[in-house]
Amino acid sequence: MEASGFEPLLSNFISDPDLTARIKALGALSSLIRNNKPGVAAFRLANGYAGLRDALSSESARFQRKALNLTHYLLSESHSDCSVFAQLGFPRVMMTLVSSNDSGVREAALGGLLELARDTTLGNRSLLADQDRLRRLLWRRIQSIRMMAPEDLDAAREERQLVDSLWIACYHEPSTLQQEGLLVLPGEESFEQPPDVAGRFFEPLRRQSVGRAPPDERSEPVSGTVGGMMMLLGPAPGNSLSN
């Protein structure tokens, strides 16, 4: 920012004739303004939000994903900007991307819509104009999820959760994914519960402990306890001398 690197990056992002250069400039801008309030303010004042909207209309799924990810970050960090994004037409564009053939684009678009729908200052006003359209789009995603093969259904876990969460936020009731058992599949952990990483790590140690053979009584080990844990210190000195 101090070396005036923001302006040329923004110019490359918005107007460079080479699509690859625009995508890379957006990646650099995204890194530059994250956790950087002056950077976000500069991006807003330089009409960067409109540039994001134009990127969402690109034919490049990679460009769309990067623009959606930055949009989601900006919405989550500054809820006061939700109305600005709504006025710029982001809800309509993101609804279109909910039907994208790219799963990453679909998930990012659903996440952006969910952030808008959950905003307490904006409520659902930005979505109300296209409420029927949104319901139809979500219903089509539910239908597509129903028809997925088991391996595809497993890979679409985040999309399933986002569809249900957005349905709840907009219509104040669970989606049919919950009723049909497609929200949390057998063997999956609940979306609200963090994964039991520590439990999976220590499970092999627990199994080894259960399967360990009892100590040989002939060795007559000297034992002690530390905090309730048995400490095996090896055979008594007399036994080692006799051997």
Image (tube, grey):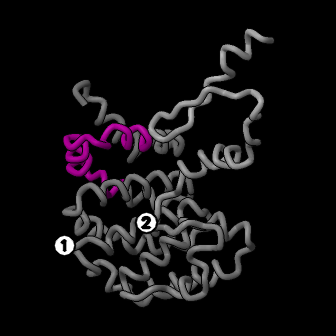
Mark 2 or mark 1: name the one nearer the start of the chain.
Answer: 2
Q: Nearer the viewer, residue 25 or 220?
A: 220
Residue 155 in picture, x, y percent from top left:
65, 63
Residue 137 in picture, x, y percent from top left:
51, 82
Relative to residue 78, is residue 153 depicted above or below? below
Q: Nearer the viewer, residue 178 or 47?
A: 178
* Residue 76, quarter of picture: bottom left
Give the farthest residue toward the top: 241
At x 20%, y 47%, the residue is 41
Relative to residue 58, is residue 123 depicted above or below? below
Residue 222 in picture, x, y percent from top left:
61, 26
Provide the secondary structure element on which disc 1 rests.
loop
Mark number displayed over residue 68: none
At x 21%, y 43%, the residue is 37
Q: CA distance from mark 2 to mark 1?
A: 18 Å
Q: Is residue 50 magenta?
A: yes
Which quarter of the image is occupied by the C terminus?
A: top right
Decide if residue 86 is on the left or right side of residue 175.
Answer: left
Mark number displayed over residue 121: 1
Report the amino acid beneath label 2: Gly
Give the farthest residue toward the right: 243
Q: Nearer the viewer, residue 176 or 205?
A: 205
Q: Is residue 44 magenta?
A: yes
Q: Which residue is mark 2?
A: 111
- Number of marks present in the image shown: 2
Q: Which residues are magenta?
A: 25-51
Residue 124 in picture, x, y percent from top left:
29, 80
Which quarter of the image is occupied by the N terminus?
A: top left
Residues packed near mark 2 inside 10 Å, few (<14), some (14 to 19) or many (20 plus): many
Residues packed near mark 1 inside 10 Å, few (<14), some (14 to 19) or many (20 plus): few
